Every structure is written in C-alpha cells, then in structure tokens.
Image (cartoon, helix red, strand yellow):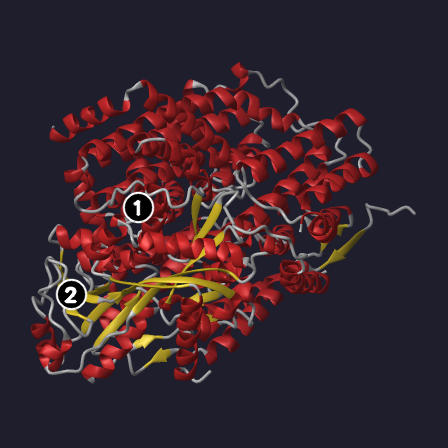
C-alpha cells in the first residue's frame, strides 16, 4: 500500500500542466521517430536527448520517459505496413503483422491490435514495477552467467518453433546468424576475430542495417513482381476509420495472449542484458504453445499481441534494475541512464530514498505516456494505413530510399548501406529458395548474449559443464525445460510412429 | 553479382578516408568559438567511469559558463570502441573543430594492440585526471577481507573477479603476476562496462569486482559493496575507501596501473579550436564542481594540456608499443 | 535500347544456398581453429570455442540441406527484381560525386518518371514526400550528416 501512495504522490508530481504537455509532446515525437526505420527506439531517444535540455530535471525525464516509451509503439508501424522492422523487437511483429495487413487486408486492425497489446503489456509491466520494483531487481540479480546461459539456450532452441515447414532450412540459417554475429571484437579476450583485417568489420555486422536489408530491402525486391498488377493497390476496399476498427472478437483474441506475455515480458526485461527483443521473441514462441485462431505467421492476431505485449512489458520491467540498482538491463536502459545522469541524478540503490519525487514521478509518467501513446496511435492509424493504397510501383523507389537513409543513419557511413544491400540481396535469394530469414535474425541477436554468458559461466565454473547447468535451482529448472524442448519433437516422433504402427497392426 | 558487390565494397572502404582528408583548407579566423552543436564521443557505455567523466566536464563547462556550446554526448561502443575512435580520427575538417573524444589509457592500449589507429591521428587536448582501481566485495560475499582471499587462494580455492575491459585487464594481469597465481585460480571475466561487473557481484556470481571509485561510489555508499584492496601505491583518501589496504601491506609489491583520463580532438582540428578547447578544459579543472568530482571519486587531479598532453600521450603509446613488441 | 525486364533465368538455388552456407561454415571453422578452442591454463574456452562448434553444426545441417536441395526444382529469377539493388548501387556511386540527397532525388525522378512512367503529378508528390523524409526528418531534425560528395566538398569544404 505504501507503494501505491508513493505512486499517487508520483502522479501529483506529474499532473501539472507543463508536465502533462511535455509528456504528450514526448509521446508524439517518440511515436514518429519510432516509426522511422533505422532510427530504432534506442537511437531515437539518444538523438532526441538534446530536446530536453531546456527543462528542469523532472520535466525533462518525464519527456524522456514518454519518448522512450512511445518509441516502442512506433516501431511496429513500419513493420506492419511495409514489412520493414525499425528495430529488433519488431522483427517478431512483422511475422504476423505484415501478412495481416496485406494478405488478410486488415491493416487497421493489425495496427490497433499491436498498439492495444503494447498498452496492455506496458500496464502489466508498470504495475509489477510499482509494487515489486526492488524485489524484481533482486530477482534479476539471481540470474548470473550460468542461469543466463541456460535461459538463452532455451530461447535459442525455441527458434525451432518458428522455422515452419522446412526445419532443416530454418536450422541452417539459425547457425548462419550465429556465425555472422561472431564477427567483430571478442569481449572476453579483447581481441578481434573474423574481421579479415577490416576496421568496419571489427565493429561487427550492425544489426539495424542487417535487418533492414534482410527483411525490408528483400521485400522491395519481391515487390517488383507485383508492380504491374492490374489493381492499383493492394487494398481495394475503402479504408475508412470504421472499417479499420477491431471487432469485439478481435479484442477477445488479443487479450489473453497479451496478458500472458505481459507477465513473461516483464520478467525477461528485468534480466541483465536480455531486453525487449528476447522478450518479444519468447512471448511469440510461448504463444505457439497456446491455441491461436489462425496459424501463427499467417497474420494471426494472437501472434502480434504476444510479441508486442511482451516487448512493451519488458521495456517497463527494465526500469526495475535501472531505478533500483542503477543497472541498465539493456541498451535501451543504457541510453535512458545517460539521460538521468545528465541531470545529475545518479540512479543507484539510493535513488528511491534520495529522490522519491523523481523516481515515482518517472514511474507515474510512464503510465501517462502509455495512455498518451495509445490514444495518439489510435488517432493516426487511419492516416497511416493510407500508405497501403499507394500503388506498388510508386512505393518501391520510396522504400529503396528509406532503406538507404535508414541504414546510413545507423552507422553514419556507407558501411551500414553496404550491409543492408548485401543482406537484402541474400535475403531475397534465401526467401525465394525456401529459406525464411527470421531464424537468422533472431539467432543473430541472441547468439552474442549466449556466447558471452556461456564463456563467463565457464570461467566461473573453472571449465566444469555440470556447474553451469546445475548451478542452482534456477539453472536446474531451466535445464529441465531445455531438455524438454529439445526432446519434445523426438518424443513426439516416437509416439507418432508408435501410434502409426498400431493401426497398421490392427489392419 | 557477388564480385561486383565486393568490388564496390572495396571502393567504398578505400574512398571513405580519401574523402575525409580530401577537403580543402579553410581559412579560419583567429579566435575560435563553437558555432554549432559539439559532438562529444564516448566509446564506453553510459554509466561507466568514462561516461561520468565526460558528463562532469560537460556540466562544469555549462554551469560555470566556460563554454556555451551545446554539447551532445554520443556513445559509440562498437568494436570495443575502435569504430568510435576511428570515426573521430577521420572526422573531416568541416566538423573537426566541433568533435571531441573522451580518450584514456584503457582506450589507447587496445587501439594500439588491435588496430593501426594511433595517437598521431588525433589532436590530444588534455589529460584531466589519473584514476586507479580497487577490488570490492559484495554485501553477501563469502570472503570479508583481502587476507581471507589470500588464504583462500593459498588453500587452492578458486576466486573470480569481474571487471571491465581495457585497463582492468592490464591491472588484472599485473595482479596475478605479482601474486604468482594462475588464471585458473584467480579468474577474470570481462564485461562491456563496470556496471556489468557490479551486477555480477551484487548477484553473488563472482567473488570480487574490479572498479574505479566513481562507478562503485553509489553502491559503496549504500553498503552493497566494500573495498578490500587498493590497486595503488598508497591508500585512497576518500572516506569510504581509505580502509582498503594496498598490496604492500601483505608483503607483496604494490600493483598499480594508473589510468589517465584525457580528451582529444580529431587530427583535422584547427590550432585555434584546439587552443580554445584546451583553455576550456583547463578552466574546468579549476572549478569547484571538478574538485568535488575528483575528491568524491578518489581521482588524482592532474591537468596536462596542449603540447604537453601531446608529448605525454605519444610517449605513453611508444612505451606501450615497445612493451607489446609492436 | 530496350531491356526485356521479364527475361528470366532458372538457377538451382535450393542447392546453391546450402553449398554457400557450407562454405561459410568451413571458412569460419578453418579460421576458428587458429583462434584456439580451450585455454587449458586458465580453464576456460577461448574465442574460437563457440564459433567453431557452431560452424561444425552449420556444416552438418548444410549437408542435409544439400541432399534436400539436389532433388528440388530450380528457382526462377527475373531480371526486373534486380533493378532494385542496381538502383541502390547507382545511388551509392552517384552520392560520392554529387552527394547523397541529390542522388536520391535524381534516382526517384528517373525511376518514377522515366522507368515507371507515372504521371508528373504523382512524381512530384512522391518526390516531395521523399525529400521531406530525408531532408526534414533525418537530416535537419535528427541531425544526420549525409555525405555531400566531391562537388559538395568543393563548394563547402
């Protein structure tokens, strides 16, 4: 109850005319920037930091919080409408979002579902943050290198859920993603590897250009096949506001996946270094275990809801270690931490004691920003979906330019553009040959985390494998889960065989 | 297609530095004043020692009206910071006067070891302070003092230290050499920034954490971390750190790998701009805010500016290159 | 000069892709061996540990892929799809001379007006939107410096 009254106190800090206005502006700008490919939520907040210079610390951080938060909403727009994920969590959103917008011709609903799930996930995350903040942070600390290794192994193997009709192809690209991610500086030894003497490769293959290429640019290459289709656009019905609203049934479909993954996402967000991508990915993988009305990957509402709720919940969950311990759980948190410190606030174990106005004001502003972002998003959706009425032949050169500018902006050099181009051409060839690129992108994100934790765990255990996998109750639990996931297809196969044999015998 | 791509890639990579240096000489008027946003690159993550250092200078400049330039700090941590350093080194003339890089000995060492980038590609502006590391134990640590750790090592127990990259690794290497233990007995795990090491310590996954005073101060104050060994030739003077003994108190030689923290500009920075920034930094080193930062973080204030900074960094690089045999 | 953009070629990429990934695995494995596998002194894996294991796994699965791919039918590639990367390369090349923003504007114009032959009105509207996104959003607002090229350097340098 004390926390609730502190939260109320936080609201009293936030609910001044100036702060609300700033929160609104922050939410609006964050949404716009988040929607731009290449400028993911991270870079967006970093680039907009200077905007907050003119305010006092509390107002500034409210704006920053709103920016950061609504950025997570905006990332889904380009993923759903153009199949260009602006940042890594949106890779998952695109899997179902783009088919829903195009093949199912329900772009408005796809965006609504995505934003409403974001909002639900966010609120769950914030409520947990409010009532269990410091406790949550302590849970996060329990995940050391050994625990993280097993958790990430669980996550990586569940890529198997995503590979679709041809598992071998999916697994091949999973390993390709892992190897590509190992290019660059090796942290543990402090020396380069697989960089072929190139200074740019020393910095590794950058993810944002990589994903813009493998998904977005490859998509434009595919679009060339459709440009002379008789229909001037992909959407023939009138895209009125009313037509884009989700039905009651849609809402029912999104609610439970969003609630479920909201909880999971919050906890993933708390873990050191895991972040929103791992959360949205696990959320989606988890949805596979539950029933979805349409098969996942064909534009299922449940798929969009699961990953969007998870990634926003993770964004909220990441505030727990950030505020309670001063530890940025992810890159996103790190930028925000930079913002906090710019104002002379040292987030750390003493922040809640020394600066209660500030800490609770920030949490309260997150609630506010969440609602603002949702209402703005709902307002702009009808305008945004008009993008789909633009003829394909006009949209092609525009997306080429956006891919170019977006990938350039990520690295401030043509290095990003080259990665984008190469990833795009190969992505196109892969997809055409029956190799879906999603597993490659996901393993690319997760592999460095896995490797780093694995090697740290080995250092700590002195090379003992057993001490990594059976390090404590958390490790053991996760190891069991890992074994279950790996053996499930085999057991299922055996059962199937046994099941198939019986009727034969009966015959 | 692939061949064409690789050729284009090659041309692009070769062409980049050419264009960077190919700009014509501009006539700069005497007395430089920043006219646009200043991009200050930090090659370490927010929250780490380098970042706190950068933010302090920036704040001190702003608060004391030393410079009203709008400074934007950007974090470029790719490739262990090499990409950020290279970007600054190659900054074209048009932007060079408004580009600054936080540069310390922990940056210089991997840069020289792994790349062809050298101090000569920068305009050293100043060395602001010297920083040293300590070893900390956590709240619920198995060991309560350095003596206990030494005993445990002698008894064949495995001790794990978590630390950051760069100079922390150098210090660790010096430490195991002095103690005469193997990497397996006293192991070290590298994190991207000290905050990662602190996370491991607070979670009880490692025994010790190597940190400079600044990054640990909040946790020390909250009682979550305690300094057990000063990696320095003399004890620290700050209140919470002065109880940490040095190695010589245990009959070993002291291990100290001093980390200097400095600021550099791109090679193309004009002499006028360099003079301006050196003056700004010198003014910062005399402010009350700066002194507070120095004492609070157990740093040693040591301002070396302009030509002296160039000489210092060049000599340091020469010594280091000789040491690693390059 | 008329290019038949519907020209197509059938390539057995379902076989070629796993061959490429196999080669990738082999290259990473070969280089990885140099990086060492296990540091028996410090009792920890070295930087070659993880990639080497993963490259072996990649090679094994690639062989499965090759077996599957050998039976698969060829995939048809059309010339038109390759105009997209070709256009991008042209923009990159041109931006070294005239700068990125003008290169994008010329590219949009050439593509829309000369290649797709859309109306003047649509061309101009599209151009305006692209310029708005590139110049107003990315360049001015987000402060990203696009290269100005050789000519730009001569003028502003």
- Residue furthest right as drawn: C1
Image-quadrant location for residue A200: bottom right
Indicate the quadrant containing the N terminus of chain A: top left, top right, bottom left or bottom right.
Answer: top left
Would residue C146 appear left or right of A137 to someone viewing this image? right
Say if C29 sits above or below B37 in the image.
Answer: below
- In percent of the image, x 45 and y 73: which residue is there? B112
Residue placed under numbered mark 2 in the picture: B236
In the picture provided, is C84 more to the left or to the right than B312? right
Q: Residue at x 36, y 48 (%)?
A: B58
- Please report the residue visible at 13 percent of the width from the left and 79 percent of the height from the top: B248
Q: Is residue A500 visible?
A: no
Nearest the camera: B202 or A502? B202
Q: Position of residue A398 (x, y in %)?
A: 67, 37
- Residue at point 66% right, 22% down? A236
Give the numbered dot on residue A268. 1
Residue A310 horizontal/vertical position (percent): 36, 39
Question: Quick check: A360 above or below C104?
Answer: above
Alpha carbon of mark 2 to alpha carbon of mark 1: how far? 39 Å
| Numbered disc total | 2
SS at badge 1: helix
Q: Position of residue A501 (x, y in %)?
A: 42, 55
> Do badges 2 and 1 share one subunit?
no
Q: x, y percentage for residue A163?
A: 49, 51
Q: Nearer the viewer, residue B289 or B33?
A: B33
Left or right? Give the position of A208 relative to B223.
right
Looking at the image, is mark 2 or mark 1 nearer the viewer? Answer: 2
Q: Secondary structure at mark 2?
A: loop
Name the subunit of mark 2. Answer: B
- Work out whether A70 lies above or below B74: above
């Amino acid at each position: 109850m004390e926390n609730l009254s502190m939260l109320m106190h936080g609201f009293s800090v936030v609910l001044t005319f100036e702060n609300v206005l700033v929160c609104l502006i922050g939410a609006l700008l964050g949404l716009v920037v988040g929607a731009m490919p290449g400028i993911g939520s991270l870079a967006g907040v970093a680039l907009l930091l200077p905007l907050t210079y003119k305010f006092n610390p509390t107002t500034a951080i409210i704006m920053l919080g709103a920016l950061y938060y609504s950025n997570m909403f905006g990332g889904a727009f380009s993923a759903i409408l153009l199949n260009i994920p602006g940042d890594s969590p949106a890779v998952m959103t695109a899997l179902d979002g783009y088919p829903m917008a195009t093949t199912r011709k329900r772009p408005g609903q796809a965006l609504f579902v995505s934003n409403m799930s974001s909002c639900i996930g966010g609120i769950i995350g914030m409520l947990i943050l409010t009532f269990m903040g410091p406790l949550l942070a302590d849970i996060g600390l329990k995940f050391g290198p050994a625990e993280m290794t097993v958790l990430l192994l669980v996550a990586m193997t569940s890529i198997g859920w995503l590979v679709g009709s041809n598992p071998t192809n999916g697994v091949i690209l999973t390993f390709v993603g892992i190897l590509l991610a190992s290019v660059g500086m090796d942290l543990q030894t402090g020396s380069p590897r697989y960089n072929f003497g190139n200074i740019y490769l020393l910095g590794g293959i950058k993810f944002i250009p990589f994903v813009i290429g493998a998904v977005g640019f490859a998509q434009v290459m595919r679009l060339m096949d459709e440009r002379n289709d008789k229909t001037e656009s992909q959407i023939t019905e009138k895209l009125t506001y009313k037509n884009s609203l989700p039905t009651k049934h849609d809402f029912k479909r999104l609610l439970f996946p969003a609630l479920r993954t909201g909880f999971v996402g919050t906890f993933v967000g708390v873990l050191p270094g895991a972040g929103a991508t791992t959360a949205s990915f696990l959320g989606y993988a988890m949805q596979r275990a539950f029933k979805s009305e349409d098969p996942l990957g064909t534009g299922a509402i449940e798929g969009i809801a699961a990953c969007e709720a998870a990634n926003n919940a993770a964004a909220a969950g990441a505030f727990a270690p950030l505020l309670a311990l001063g530890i940025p759980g992810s890159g996103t948190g790190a930028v925000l931490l930079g913002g906090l410190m710019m104002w002379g606030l040292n987030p750390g174990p003493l922040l809640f004691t020394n600066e209660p106005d500030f800490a609770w004001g920030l949490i309260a502003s997150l609630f506010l920003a969440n609602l603002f972002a949702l209402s703005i998003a709902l307002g702009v959706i009808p305008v945004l979906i008009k993008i789909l009425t633009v003829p394909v032949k006009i949209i092609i050169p525009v997306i080429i330019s956006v891919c170019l500018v977006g990938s350039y902006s990520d690295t401030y050099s043509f290095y990003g553009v080259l990665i984008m181009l190469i990833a795009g051409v190969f992505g196109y060839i892969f997809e055409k040959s029956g190799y879906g690129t999603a597993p490659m992108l996901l393993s690319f994100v997760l592999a460095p985390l896995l490797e780093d934790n694995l090697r740290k765990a080995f250092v700590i255990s002195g090379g003992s494998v057993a001490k990594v996998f059976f390090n404590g109750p958390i490790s053991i639990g996760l190891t069991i889960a890992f074994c279950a996931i790996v053996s499930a297809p085999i057991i299922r196969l055996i059962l199937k065989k046994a099941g198939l044999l019986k009727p034969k015998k009966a015959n | 297609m692939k061949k064409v791509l690789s050729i284009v890639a090659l041309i692009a990579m070769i062409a980049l530095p050419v264009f960077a240096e190919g700009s014509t000489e501009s006539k700069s008027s005497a007395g430089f004043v920043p006219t646009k946003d200043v991009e200050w690159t930090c090659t370490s993550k927010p929250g780490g020692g380098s970042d706190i250092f950068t933010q302090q200078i920036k704040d001190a400049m702003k608060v004391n009206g030393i410079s009203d330039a709008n400074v934007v700090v950007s974090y470029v941590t790719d490739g262990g910071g090499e990409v950020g350093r290279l970007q600054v080194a190659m900054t074209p003339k048009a932007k060079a006067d408004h580009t600054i890089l936080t540069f310390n000995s922990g940056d210089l060492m991997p840069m020289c070891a792994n790349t062809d980038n050298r101090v000569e590609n920068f305009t050293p502006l100043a060395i602001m302070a010297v920083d040293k590391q300590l070893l900390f134990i956590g709240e619920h640590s198995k060991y309560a003092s350095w003596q206990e750790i030494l005993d445990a090592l002698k008894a064949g127990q495995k001790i794990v230290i978590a630390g950051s990259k760069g100079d922390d690794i150098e210090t660790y290497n010096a430490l195991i050499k002095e103690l005469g233990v193997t990497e397996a007995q006293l192991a070290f795990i590298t994190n991207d920034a000290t905050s990662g090491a602190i996370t491991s310590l607070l979670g009880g996954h490692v025994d010790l954490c190597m940190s400079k005073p600044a990054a640990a101060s909040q946790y020390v104050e909250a009682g979550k971390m305690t300094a057990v060994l000063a990696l320095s030739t003399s004890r620290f003077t700050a209140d919470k750190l002065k109880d940490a003994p040095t190695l010589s108190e245990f009959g070993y030689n002291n291990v100290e790998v001093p980390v200097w923290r400095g600021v550099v500009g791109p090679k193309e920075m004009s002499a006028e701009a360099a003079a301006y920034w050196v003056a700004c930094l010198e003014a910062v080193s005399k402010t009350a805010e700066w002194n507070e930062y120095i004492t609070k973080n157990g740093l040693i204030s040591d301002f070396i500016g302009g030509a002296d900074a160039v000489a210092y960094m060049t000599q340091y690089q020469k010594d280091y290159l000789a040491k690693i045999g390059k | 000069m008329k290019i038949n953009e519907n020209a197509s070629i059938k390539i057995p990429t379902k076989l070629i892709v796993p061959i490429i990934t196999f080669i990738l695995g082999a290259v990473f494995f070969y280089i990885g061996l140099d990086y060492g596998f296990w540091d028996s002194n410090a009792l920890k894996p070295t930087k070659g540990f993880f990639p080497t294991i993963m490259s072996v796994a990649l090679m094994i699965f690639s062989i499965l892929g090759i077996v599957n791919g050998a039976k698969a039918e060829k995939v048809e590639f059309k010339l038109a799809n390759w105009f997209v990367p070709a256009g991008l390369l042209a923009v990159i090349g041109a931006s070294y001379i005239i700068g990125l923003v003008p290169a994008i504007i010329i590219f949009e114009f050439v593509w829309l007006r000369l290649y797709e032959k859309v109306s003047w009105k649509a061309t101009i509207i599209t151009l305006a939107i692209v310029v708005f996104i590139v110049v107003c959003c990315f360049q001015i607002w987000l402060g990203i410096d696009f290269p100005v090229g050789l000519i730009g350097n001569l003028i502003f340098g």
